[in-house]
């Protein structure tokens, strides 16, 4: 069973950082030289508490697999170097809180992996519903098609009750987050830098929106810069939080393929949206399809892939579907009966036949250019129409 189903109740943002008396020791220890998530886990398994780890001698530390005498000495020498009080004061100022592996708010799916982050910085909140999550990842440099598909899949999945997980990078990540928000759904952004640095900087407004309808998280100290070496570790968190990952427009060497690698290691489902066969932007996605990733071109395909996880997920998805039907008065995944505005209904009614140019739609509906363009964008996001070359539109 996917561990996310074990989520124990709704989480709320703490007004202070006293949720764990030893959070300062956790921060000190994980920032000590020679200690990463895997070593931290081994230490915790051996000594049971962070307080005991912090008091361990060099000789005691060397009994841990992977810790030699030199590493043990580095740990002891540097475990008081990090200043948690300063860090927590800055976190409080930024509206960020810090949780550790012992905190009830720590996401169970993430806790289950062997290299789980010992601490997480969070702006926003985790909820029980986040156990039903899908990651959408892809290239920073992407085409209009890629952006459209990322927004569309995220919008429909979020409408159905799924939380969308991504990395808030330019391109596909940003489109995925925006698609979820457009559906009034939940989304989680995993940053490859500290939460005092919004990256990319043009996503400052998006960062705030995500924190308001989900969470922006990082395992890194608040002031850490968005360096390239941070992103592979960031990608493992994206994979771990999700039941499956959907790759959209990944180049042959895209960082999104690292998320795929982590997903396979954590026994998550891997899916990919096909693109143009002659586009380098889709080379990575097509490669993993050839290697066994499930080709998906509609939400039903995603559901089929996720159905393999087990009966527990099916029951949880059924509850999410029932809730979505009540709120939107539509059957789950029937895009033909999505709630539409009057303008959207007027536009789509014209597109039953041959493709029409935008100017023709404006002329026949008499709605005005702004209203028509807005309706066309919304209908594309909902997967009801497609755009053809020459600014032509057709109903799917």
Image (cartoon, grey):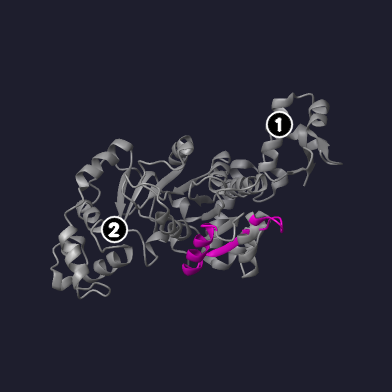
Residue 340 picture quarter: top right
Residue 344 picture quarter: top right
Does residue 382 appear in this view? yes
Classify mark 2: residues with Cα within 10 Å, few (<14), some (14-19) or many (20+).
Answer: some
Q: Is residue 276 left or right of residue 83?
A: right
Q: Is residue 63 left or right of residue 275?
A: left
- Labelled pair 2, 1 in contact (Cβ < 8 Å): no
Could you tell me residue 375's position as x and y percent?
70, 33
Residue 118 picture quarter: bottom left
Q: Closer to the camera, 25 or 365?
A: 25
Q: Closer to the camera, 342 or 121?
A: 121
Could you tell me residue 264's position as x and y percent?
51, 68
Front: mark 2 or 1: 1
Residue 86 vs 282, above or below: the answer is: above
Taking the spot 68% from the left edge, 58% from the top edge, the residue there is 274
* Residue that label 2 marks: 102
Residue 265, magenta (yes or no): yes
* Magenta segment: 254-280
Q: CA distance from mark 2 to mark 1?
A: 50 Å
* Number of dots carrying numbers: 2
Classify mark 1: residues with Cα within 10 Å, few (<14), some (14-19) or many (20+).
Answer: some
Could you tell me residue 160's position as x and y percent?
59, 49
Could you tell me residue 203's position as x and y percent?
48, 38
* Residue that label 1 marks: 373
């Amino acid at each position: 069973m996917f561990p996310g189903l074990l989520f124990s109740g709704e989480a709320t943002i703490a007004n202070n950082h006293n949720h764990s008396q030893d959070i300062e020791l956790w921060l000190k220890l994980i920032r000590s030289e020679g200690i990463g998530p895997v070593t931290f886990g081994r230490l915790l398994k051996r000594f049971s508490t962070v307080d005991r780890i912090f008091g361990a001698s060099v000789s005691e530390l060397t009994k841990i697999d992977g810790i030699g005498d030199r590493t043990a000495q580095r740990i002891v020498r540097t475990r008081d170097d990090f200043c948690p009080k300063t860090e927590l004061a800055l976190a409080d100022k930024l509206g960020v809180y810090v949780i550790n592996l012992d905190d009830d708010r720590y996401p169970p799916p993430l806790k289950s992996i062997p290299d789980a982050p010992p601490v997480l910085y969070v702006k926003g909140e985790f909820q029980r519903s986040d156990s039903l999550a899908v990651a959408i990842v892809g290239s920073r440099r992407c085409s209009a098609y890629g952006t459209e598909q990322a927004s569309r899949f995220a919008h429909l999945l979020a409408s159905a009750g799924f939380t969308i997980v991504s990395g808030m990078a330019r391109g596909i990540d940003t489109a995925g987050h925006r698609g979820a928000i457009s559906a009034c759904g939940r989304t989680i952004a995993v940053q490859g830098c500290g939460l005092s640095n919004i990256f990319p900087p043009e996503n400052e407004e998006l960062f705030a929106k995500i924190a308001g309808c989900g969470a922006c998280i990082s395992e890194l100290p608040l002031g850490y810069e968005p360096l390239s070496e941070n992103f592979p570790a960031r990608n493992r968190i994206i994979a771990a939080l999700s039941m499956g990952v959907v790759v959209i427009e990944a180049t042959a060497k895209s960082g999104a393929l690292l998320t795929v690698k982590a997903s396979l290691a954590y026994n998550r489902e891997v899916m990919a949206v096909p693109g143009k066969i002659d586009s380098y932007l889709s080379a990575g996605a097509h490669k993993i399809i050839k290697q066994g990733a499930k080709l998906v071109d509609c939400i039903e395909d995603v559901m089929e892939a996720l159905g393999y996880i087990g009966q527990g997920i099916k029951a949880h998805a059924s509850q999410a579907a029932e809730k979505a039907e009540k709120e939107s008065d539509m059957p789950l995944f029937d895009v033909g009966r999505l709630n539409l505005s009057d303008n959207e209904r007027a536009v789509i009614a014209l597109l039953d036949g041959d493709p029409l140019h935008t100017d023709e739609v404006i002329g026949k509906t008499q709605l005005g250019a702004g209203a028509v363009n807005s309706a066309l964008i919304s209908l594309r996001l909902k997967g009801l129409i497609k755009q053809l070359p020459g600014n032509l539109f057709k109903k799917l």
